[in-house]
Image (cartoon, helix red, strand yellow):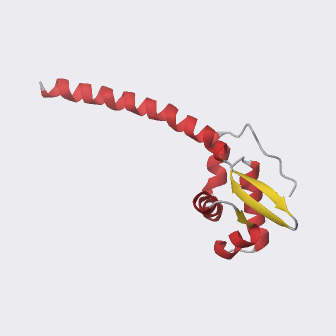
Amino acid sequence: MGYELSMNTTPSELFTSLADPTRRAIFERLSRDGEQTVRALTNHAGVSQPAVSKHLGVLKLAGLVRDRRDGRQTHYSVEPQGLAPLIDWMNLYGAFWRDRFDRLETLLKRMDQ
């Protein structure tokens, strides 16, 4: 396919990659069911094989899936480390919002007194 695996994908690029519902469904299927061939993914995707291949290329470029050749077939599986930038982003904002909610709780308790 000619796509390179990106090790420096940003959260924005990951959000963009997963924003497409068909691409997200392919990623979720791989996450849930494990390694799949392009044909198996196409049978469940509701789009053509070339479209599935393009979606897989985007996911691979984002570092979310990896491929493995076996003769004439290509098998795809989830690359768990690909989600690391999103997890880091969520942790950052989780800490931000926990702090804000703690401040709000403190303020509400003072107002009740």
Instruction: Point out the image quarter for the N terminus.
Output: bottom right
Decide which of 29, 62 is in the foreground and name it.
29
Q: Position of residue 68 (x, y in %)?
A: 80, 57
Question: In the displayed image of the protein, which residue is found farthest to the left?
Answer: 113
x 73%, y 37%: residue: 8
Residue at point 74% right, 55% down? 58
Residue 50's place in the image compared with 66, above or below, is below
The quarter of the picture where residue 20 lies is bottom right
Q: Residue at x 84, y 59 (%)?
A: 69
> In the rendered picture of this protein, how many numbered marks are placed on residues?
0
- Would residue 52 be seen by someone viewing this image from the given angle? yes
Q: Does residue 46 show up?
A: no
Q: Nearer the viewer, residue 33 or 50?
A: 33
Q: Nearer the viewer, residue 66 or 48?
A: 66
**Position of 28 relative to 100 (above/below):** below
| Side (left or right) of 74 relative to 79 | right
Q: Quadrant of residue 49?
A: bottom right
Instruction: Please state, as top left, top right, bottom left or bottom right, where the C terminus lies in the image.
Output: top left
From the top left corner, tell me how far across and down residue 96 is, in percent.
44, 30
Residue 79 rendering spot, x and y as whole percentages? 68, 48
Residue 76 drawn above or below residue 7: below
Residue 106 picture quarter: top left
Q: Name the residue at the front extreme.
A: 70
Where is residue 32? Give x, y as percent. 57, 60
Task: Please give the name of the residue rendered at 52% of the width and 38% of the height, measured from the top-left corner.
Answer: 90
Name the foreground residue: 70 vs 52. 70
